[in-house]
Amino acid sequence: MNRMKVVSIVGMPGSGKSDVATMFRDKGFTYVRFGDITDEEVKKQGLKLNEKNERQTRESLRKQYGMDAYARLSLPRIDAALKTSNVVVDGLYSWEEYTFLKGHYGDDFIVVAVWSSPQARHTRLGSRKIRPLTPQDAAGRDRAEIENLNKGGPISLADFTVLNDSSLADLKQQVERIIERLK
């Protein structure tokens, strides 16, 4: 890669976005997680980290700053990291975030979509150690992200799509092929 790149990971909850972002981080990309902004705000308000408080915080931040809030609020972290390395952003959510980052970084902004079936995603979300979700919570989060966040656009316009419906080894091979193409 001649110029530093910002690779943003998008996908529905439980699709494997964090796994993919970690694979990029393991290849030398600096890791920036949009969700850290939510976690920090929930803690700042003295609330417990759970789906209800996180959702309210996400919606509140977007109401206050606009639908591109997470991209705008993360921009200083991304720009600071770009001074020394490529960046992987875990958790692109909205069309507005996509257009903001694409407008800011141009051709150096790359989107990787991670796809898994709803059944596989909901099973993963129910069994994860941090922030597990019930099937009802997972389905509710799916609806909220589709209906309220305009998440379909970034997924459909992704530069690359990986299918996370097999093994972790297969997912890793797909990600390594993308990283190689970005060089």
Image (cartoon, rainbow, N blue to C red):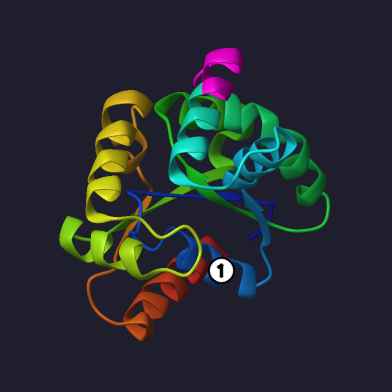
- The chief SS type of the magenta part is helix
Return the residue nearer the eye: 89 or 53: 53
Answer few, some or many: residues within 10 Å of disc 1's Cα (few below 14, many 20 plus, some between 14 and 19): some
Which residue is located at x 74 percent, y 36 percent? 44
Residue 31 seen:
yes
Quadrant of residue 101 within the rendered picture: top right
Q: How many marks?
A: 1
At horizontal 63% and vertical 39% (from top left) the residue drawn is 47
Q: Which residues are magenta?
A: 60-67
Residue sitting at x 42%, y 78%: 172
Q: Position of residue 71 (x, y in %)?
A: 60, 32
| Location of residue 165 with respect to 173 vertically, above or below | above
Q: Position of residue 177 (x, y in %)?
A: 42, 73
Let me know if residue 15 is in the magenta part.
Answer: no
Placement of 66 over or under 120, stated as above or below = above
Could you say where residue 146 lies in the image, as x and y percent from the top left? 27, 33
Disc 1 marks which amino acid?
Thr
Depth check: 180 or 95 in front? 95
Q: Position of residue 138 (x, y in %)?
A: 28, 49
- Which residue has dot 1 on it? 22
* SS class, disc 1: helix
Residue closest to the eye, 123 or 8: 123
Quadrant where the C terminus sits is bottom right
The quadrant of the picture occupied by the N terminus is bottom right
